[in-house]
Image (cartoon, coloured by chain):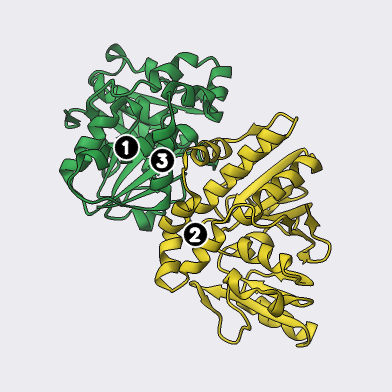
Chain colours: A green, B yellow
């Protein structure tokens, strides 16, 4: 199985993503928020790249049972129902709802994989479930797209990607053929003693702590809290049909 | 001291490089070749981005004592005097010569930093010398640009960059403020038991071995073979004026 890891949004082109199985990782916080919302009973999620896309889409779906969520520079967008803290996406808030989500990096990454065969959403929260899903799906090739932060590598995404590669290699019978990004991330993840410390000391983590989101950091660093695998197909993440292991 | 590491050519824009002290790392092989050529007595090196730039420049300098070197897809360019193997750049070949050099990634990276205050060329071969140079220069900020390979992170450059960050942090009295790329590369480098194995197992290393350049891999993986610090200012690397420690 060919397994390539990319360090930030834009490194995997739409053309390269076409027809592939893509895994999008944005630990802080889009991936963690999506996994949590699906776990907590959201009906479906429509990830969009821009605030304008979200606002344009909302009236076409009606106000009833439709939530609009997301952030720019870490903060809730004006006029939106929810921000991008997974802690907001409780069962009370999301059960049975359609969620339109727009974040700085994560939903841009997902929207940029529109031509992918399917796009799996991964985070520390559902890492082993995603690894098991990929191992049983046995695709020919997997592209792991770490969303990054401000156009650069984000260490929390890179370590999460590395841990995913490691988990897959330990559980699959297939031989993994990795690119240098996957090999580097895996070796780094193996050397990291504490995921929480990686997340808290990351550039994005420190920024979010300044904004008052320290509780999000601990939440997003929890390994294998959930067994849910959100999958985006044709720009939609189906809540009820998500794989649960 | 602010220290940011970038994982591939193009991640550091010309605008971001402007006025900065930039370190370019292309272990396989442009950085290693430049360090070796300077060590072996080259008069000056003019790194250029394209083959056309090299061919256009050569007649303006005259044939006498001018060499034109470089590669595309690992192989010597047709009509050029030398390829991109550091083993070709012997004292006999380069002493007193002007070298025009064009490679796939490394010289593109250097040429892309035209507006930088100065551009230091680093490799495993001169790692400690570069670290010492940077520590004594005490710049406000350093940008470490790993050239990468085929538009992706190259593990040999990333580990070399991480080792440079580690060496600097151990020897400077200044507090290093690193981006996630620098922190990730440093943690990875600390976990790597064998540089030679990193270089040989890298994507680019395997490609070069296929092309018959296995001896280059061992040569480029040698730590601190030289104490020379090539510095590009205004698009020229002065051989005789290079810092020697």
> Of A176 and B60, which appears nearest the observer?
A176
What residue is rendered at 78% in x and 56% in y? B244
| Residue A14 seen anywhere in this rendered image of the structure | yes
> Of B97 and A52, which appears nearest the observer?
B97
Q: Secondary structure at mark 3?
A: helix
Q: Secondary structure at mark 2?
A: loop
Q: Point out the frontmost of discs 3 and 1.
A: 3
- Give how far apart the Cα atoms at labels 2 and 3 are: 19 Å
Label 2 chain ID: B
Q: List x then y, in percent, for residue A107.
A: 40, 37
Q: List x then y, in percent, for residue A219.
A: 39, 17
Q: Examine the rendered structure and indicate whether residue A199 appears above or below residue A158.
A: above
Left or right? Give the position of A36 relative to B234.
left
Q: Secondary structure at mark 1?
A: helix
Which disc number belongs to residue A187?
3
Q: Quadrant of residue A101?
A: top left
Q: Badge 3: few (under 14), some or many (20 or more) residues near its Cα, within 10 Å?
A: many
Left or right? Give the position of B6 relative to B94.
left
| Residue B153 seen anywhere in this rendered image of the structure | no
* Whether labels 1 and 2 share one chain: no
Which disc number belongs to residue B149?
2
Q: Badge 1: few (under 14), some or many (20 or more) residues near its Cα, within 10 Å?
A: many
Q: Point out the frontmost of discs 2 and 3.
A: 3
Q: List x then y, in percent, for residue B54.
A: 67, 78
Left or right? Give the position of A134 relative to B245.
left
- Give how far apart the Cα atoms at labels 3 and 1 are: 12 Å
């Amino acid at each position: 199985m060919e397994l390539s890891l990319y360090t930030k949004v834009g490194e995997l082109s739409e053309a390269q993503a076409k027809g592939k199985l893509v895994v999008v990782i944005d630990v802080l916080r889009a991936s963690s928020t999506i996994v949590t919302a699906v776990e907590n009973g959201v009906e479906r999620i429509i990830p969009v790249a821009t605030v304008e896309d979200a606002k344009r889409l909302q009236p076409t779906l009606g106000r009833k049972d439709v939530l609009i969520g997301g952030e720019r520079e870490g903060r809730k967008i004006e006029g939106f129902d929810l921000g991008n803290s997974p802690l907001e996406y409780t069962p009370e808030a999301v059960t049975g709802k359609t969620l339109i989500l727009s974040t700085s990096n994560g939903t841009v990454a997902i929207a940029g994989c529109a031509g992918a065969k399917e796009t799996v959403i991964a985070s520390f929260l559902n890492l082993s479930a995603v690894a098991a899903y990929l191992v049983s799906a046995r695709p020919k090739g997997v592209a792991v797209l770490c969303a990054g932060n401000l156009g650069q590598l984000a260490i929390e995404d890179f370590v999460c990607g590395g841990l995913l590669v490691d988990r897959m290699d330990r559980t699959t019978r297939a031989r993994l053929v990795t690119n240098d990004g996957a090999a580097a991330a895996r070796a780094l993840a193996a050397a990291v003693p504490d995921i929480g410390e990686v997340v808290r000391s990351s550039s994005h983590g420190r920024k979010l702590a300044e904004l008052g989101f320290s509780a999000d950091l601990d939440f997003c660093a929890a390994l294998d809290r959930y067994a849910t695998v959100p999958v985006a197909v044709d720009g939609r993440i189906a809540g009820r049909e998500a794989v649960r292991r």
